[in-house]
Amino acid sequence: MSEQRREKSRNIGALRNLWPFLKPHKGLAFGWLVFLGISSSASLVLPVAVRHIIDHGFLASSLATINGTFLALFGVALVLAIATAARYFCIALLGERSLASLRTALYEHVIQLDVGFYESTRVGELTSRLGTDTEVVQTLVGSGISVALRSAVMLIGAAAAMAWTSPRLAGLTALVIPAVMLPILVFGRRVQKLSRNSQDRIADAAAVANETLNAAQAVKAYAREPIESRRYASAIALALATARRRIGMRSLLTAAVIVLIFGAITLVLWAGARDVIAGDLAPGVLSQFVLYAIFAAGSVAGLSEVWGDVLRAAGAMERIGELFAERATIRTPDAPEPLPRPVTGALRFEHVEFRYPSRPDVPALSDFHLEIAPGETVALVGPSGAGKSTVFSLLLRFHDPVSGAIRLDGVDLRALALPELRGAIALVPQETVIFGGTAADNIRFGRGDASDDEVREAARLAEADSFISALPDGYEAALGERGVRLSGGQKQRVAIARAILRDAPLLLLDEATSALDAQSEAAIQHALERLEKGRTTLVIAHRLATVQRADRIVVMDGGRIVAQGTHDSLLAEGGLYAELARLQFVA
């Protein structure tokens, strides 16, 4: 997230964004409100029962009166217990369901954002918002809101009951209310700011851990464990320092409120005791008033305590809201144009200009013009930074050209629905991503509805069947996080099996055999030749030996096409390709 977005105004208005996730569960919210009303009413009846016990039970010395009063008291307690349990069930379940809806909607939104967003955002920060921030919100919904509304209802009810019981004492109590509210207003904004900062620092620490643990092999290879441990410890220390300030400020708030509340109670008790001695107030009435005052004081204390949770949740929801506010710049047009059927794979790059947003002054492609016939195999070669991978990124519409156009079967890619465009492409990337599922699941990533027989056939054609079958559970073997149980060459064969299974008219091979030994590469090349038949194929390769069979070789340098032709014609022509060939084959 950019610093500009981080510095947006912070206020509890961000909690309004919770409403869409609470709205579908109105039944639970209604039940909670009903049981809240019942439990609060039962609580407010208790002081009346105590007054009757003091004024009519003890003074009358009537056993029947005492029995009836205490039986009624137990009945009130029973109603209070049942209503409280039901209220807790409703609000806790409401919190869980709304949290599930929030997490699902947030993940669905984030996964739809384009590649440019992920190039500027750390994955660790995203997982922190999906995890830590949503848990903070759940705490508010599952308990904080319940405590806050219960305290508010009890405060209002107790205040009304105090005024009904003794207007004079209630007036004295009202005089100290501004003094109680003042620290909440003074400290509240500071607590909110520190709560937001604390969540940001926790996200930073999570991002450090995520990127380090995902690169565990590199960390160990360079013996950086102590350095990375210190880096993570520094991030945690910073988060702890911010949390300490937040906790300290919240502690001061709590202490100030408690002192003022019990100071008010002491004042009221002192005044009430003088009235009882003077005969102006019955002891039972004073007891009833004091209990209501305690209820009101406890409610104010509860509100001040939960206010910190409200502020933390507001900060967390604001961070979540920032993610919801993100919009993909690459998206399906409102009225997409369909591809002609069947898709032949004819490609045309029309004087394409492109610059990456992070490097706007450096053209990645400049006046790139290329036509590829259906079924043709074209190899892109050139030094690093020539723009080869950029061609693939534009074809997949991870980015759009600054000027010019790219057409598939005569249709501008920007006019196509993204699922239709990407559904017509099979990609074998240089760095294969292996998920933590089974071998079959990883191959089926290419086409989710493929049968087991189709998965096995794709693996056989990709020369992956033998090593997969040798695993302890075969195709049902878990490959571990990021495929830790596979070698680099085995990972690439899984990627090739995915592409075979996808059976798309346009095939993109990005160094598809770079991690294979000579024997495996020979077998894979045969499989790729079968795969390429009837498909338009673009191949990126630094090893020129792998592209000699291409129908055409396009030589790129500095984002431009500097030459194109067959292997033999380019050698005869001299230039960059001949120099690259000399460096590779002579060496």
Image (spheres, grey):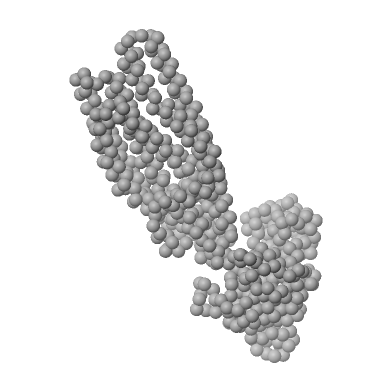
Q: Nearer the viewer, residue 446 or 93?
A: 93
Left/right placement of residue 229 relative to residue 180 reads right
Q: Is residue 250 visible?
A: yes
Q: Nearer the viewer, residue 369 or 481?
A: 369
Q: Nearer the viewer, residue 333 or 252?
A: 333
Q: How many marks?
A: 0
> Residue extending furthest left?
278
**Position of residue 486 measured from the top left corner of the image (x, y, whole percent):** 68, 59
* Quarter of the image where one finds residue 50: top left
* Quarter of the image where one finds residue 296: top left
Residue 582 vertical position relative to residue 315 in the rendered view, above or below: below
Left/right placement of residue 501 relative to residue 230 reads right
Q: Residue at x 42, y 28 (%)?
A: 41
Residue 397 vertical position relative to residue 140 in the rendered view, above or below: below
* Quarter of the image where one finds residue 506: bottom right
The C terminus lies in quadrant: bottom right
Q: Residue at x 75, y 65 (%)?
A: 503
> Residue extending furthest bottom?
573
Q: Residue at x 47, y 47 (%)?
A: 136
Q: Is residue 472 visible?
A: no
Left/right placement of residue 134 relative to residue 581 reads left
**Position of residue 103 measured from the top left corner of the image (x, y, whole percent):** 55, 50
Q: Residue at x 48, y 29 (%)?
A: 83
Residue 570 vertical position relative to residue 546 in the rendered view, above or below: below
